Image (tube, rainbow, N blue to C red):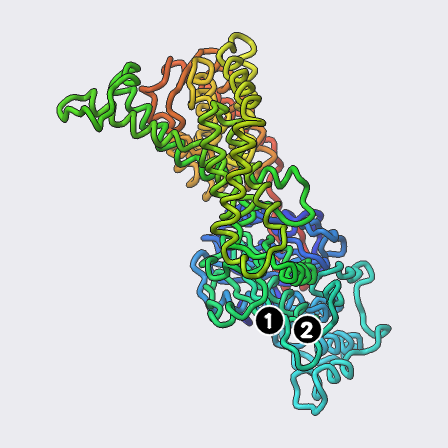
Amino acid sequence: MSDMITADLVDLDLAAATKEEAARSLAGRMVALGRVTDLDGFLADVAAREAQMPTGLDGGIGIPHCRSAHVTEPTLAFGRAATGIDFGAPDGPADLVFLIAAPAGADDAHLTILSALARRLMDPDFTSALRETDSPTTAAALVRGDVEPADASAASAASAVPAAEAPTGSETDRVTPPAGTGTGSGTGTGAEQAAASVPSPASVPSPASVPSPAPAPGSASAPASVPGEGAAEPEGSTPFRVVAVTSCPTGIAHTYMAAEALERVGQEAGVEVTVETQGSAGFARLDAAVVEAADAVIFAHDVPVRDKERFAGKPTVDVGVKAGINRAAELIAEAREKAARGEVSAASRPAPVESAGEPGEGYGSKLRKWLMSGVSYMIPFVAAGGLLIALGFALGGYEITSAKSVADVFVWGDHTSWAALLFQIGGLAFSFLIPVLAGYIAYGMADRPGLVPGFVGGAIAITIKAGFLGGLVAGLLAGAVVLAIQKVRVPAVLRGIMPVVVIPLISSAIVGFLMFLVIGKPLASLQQALTDWLNGLSGANAIILGAILGLMMCFDLGGPLNKVAYTFAVGGLANPNEGSLKVMAAVMAAGMVPPLAMALATTVRGKLFTKAERENGKAAWVLGASFITEGAIPFAAADPLRVIPSVMAGGAVTGALSMAFECTLRAPHGGIFVVPLIGNAFLYLLAILAGTVVGAGLVILLKGMRKTSQTPPQPAATAEKSGVVTAV
């Protein structure tokens, strides 16, 4: 760790009001030492990681981190802020900020060292020592692990004596622990040595403006206790056993901090906790015997758990990785309660983006995640089936719909037969849309037991002509029924067959009854009314709808709102009419604008963008032309306040013009590659061009008005010599 952080990478007076300013200030130190080659490119990668999940932790800690091609070697910078910086932690702003920079191909050894730091952050003595020290050298030594927290406190106290009595040494020398303390050879226990070496509070110089935040209830640094349980199991009894898996998108920090919190709380509560960390350094699979002997499972993850079928049939608590850090005691208590009730799971739930969400989330957030689960699994069927249908029309004309089955009649040399083949394959793929949507909405709510009633409900929605609305309702209904059944306590002898036989049987019967006889006909009537409304759109109403859909497609660049607009358009293709084909055209045209606008902007005014952004701009031409809206995400992550409003304006212009020109589209995907399948193709391309120019022009205008970037901070050693520390 000694080569990862030095005193030059420590700022004990971090002057920053926002997390972006803090990251820029600390990253400037990395640039000054040659650890980062492109400041703006690196900060864009940090922002993209931050957009996935806030990096603030309870206890006043912020840990922005990322892997980046702009990092030459694994590096860690530390800053201590006099005023708190908001990193999205539940308990408020952070005063301790760790910026972790890992190269795109960081080796396992360095990642293991970083994981060790992440675990130490859960130690309140460690964070307290960092708040107390007034020496960058001591802070760097603490982070490296060269000294223990108690020794650092003693060193801070020693630094208060006159300079003539203080030990000398270079800025990057390691701190030598006082004899007989910390890791020395004294005969007392570690706790006794720490107690003997820590000076009284009055003698410890600590910044008055940086109070040590109180640990949040249930956090790893709070007094650990499991609600409703004793502090330890009776002597001689078998302890309650929990196996856990932790993982986060980057796999550098949160993964290991959640593991440390669970292990610490489990030890203090008398629960045997064994954790498998699925981080960037790989993972050591839990022994099968340990999994078999476990009484419950905890998944604290933001990416899918690898080989999750190993844990099937056990009481399972499934949450995001930050819950594992902040609510470890609650999770262990919940695992014990589920085991006591006999609840079991066929397998772990999907990653949180597809799950019911964490306890305490609002119903709106949960509903969004359930619906996104169904949409994410449906889209590949949309792309494959829709494009095949469109190609069938292109080869055989619209009369291809009346062609006989190719299984009965197929002429190898006749292009009409090939057109019929493509159309019929695409039609079959498209027929799965509603069942897949319903099935995976239920899957997002209730895991695998929700699949059967969800697919059954979706198939019924097709039968009664309830369309996409019927599929949405059927999926939510199936998930709710399964969750209700899972709450019923059953004898132990029946638990093994519940996920395979009992739950699918009962839930399918209930969902089928409700869809056929109770809510099916009202849903079918509502779906027909929506179809008639789309078919009757014309004039100003159509233009306004096109502008709204364009704004939705460009607001979150492939996120939930984008998917809502896209799903609305695709729903109309199941029973196409003139109105639904216009909507599909407007949605795809608007979705192409963001990456094309950024590509044009980087070409026209390249000086306004970093080298990395200019390279991304070249790829954005192809991504935009292919209707991959996500191609604009790197630009939006680096400068959201200028990029997102600009591309939204361009998308609105394109959507409105597409509707005004009465362009139509039967293919749900493909970008410019399906232009032959577009009605009024020339005007369609003109609408895309107009929106691209508007979006690019606004980006260039807003970036041109931005003040010039501030100079990166001086290295600590140079700044201290001049008596001034520059902060960005």
Nearest the camera: 391 or 649? 391
Nearest the camera: 261 or 38? 261
x and y, in percent, of residue 272 in the image: 62, 72
Nearest the camera: 356 or 495? 495
> Splitting the image into 4 quarters, where does residue 669 fall?
top left
> Splitting the image into 4 quarters, where does residue 148 fall?
bottom right
x and y, in percent, of residue 106 in the image: 45, 61
x and y, in percent, of residue 599 in the image: 44, 32
Task: Name the residue: 70% across, 81% down.
Answer: 235
Helix, strand or loop at mark 2: loop
Residue for badge 1? 144
Residue 703's tag is none
Decide: is 510 above or below 150.
Answer: above
Looking at the image, can residue 724 be seen? no
Helix, strand or loop at mark 1: helix
x and y, in percent, of residue 221 in the image: 72, 65
- Could you tell which of marks 1 and 2 lies nearer the N-terminus? 1
Mark 1: amino acid: Arg
Task: Name the residue: 33% across, 19% down.
Answer: 677
Left or right: 32 with respect to 83?
left
Question: What residue occupies the far bottom of the structure in this picture?
Answer: 187
Nearest the camera: 13 or 575? 575
Q: Dot 1, crowdedness within 10 Å: few (<14), some or many (≥20)?
A: many
Question: What residue occupies the far top of the structure in this picture?
Answer: 539
Q: Dot 2, crowdedness within 10 Å: few (<14), some or many (≥20)?
A: some
Left or right: 17 with respect to 639?
right
Nearer the camera: disc 1 or disc 2: 2
Real-space CA distance between mark 1 and mark 2, rounded to the nearest whole angstrom:
31 Å
Residue 270's tag is 2
Mark 2: amino acid: Gly
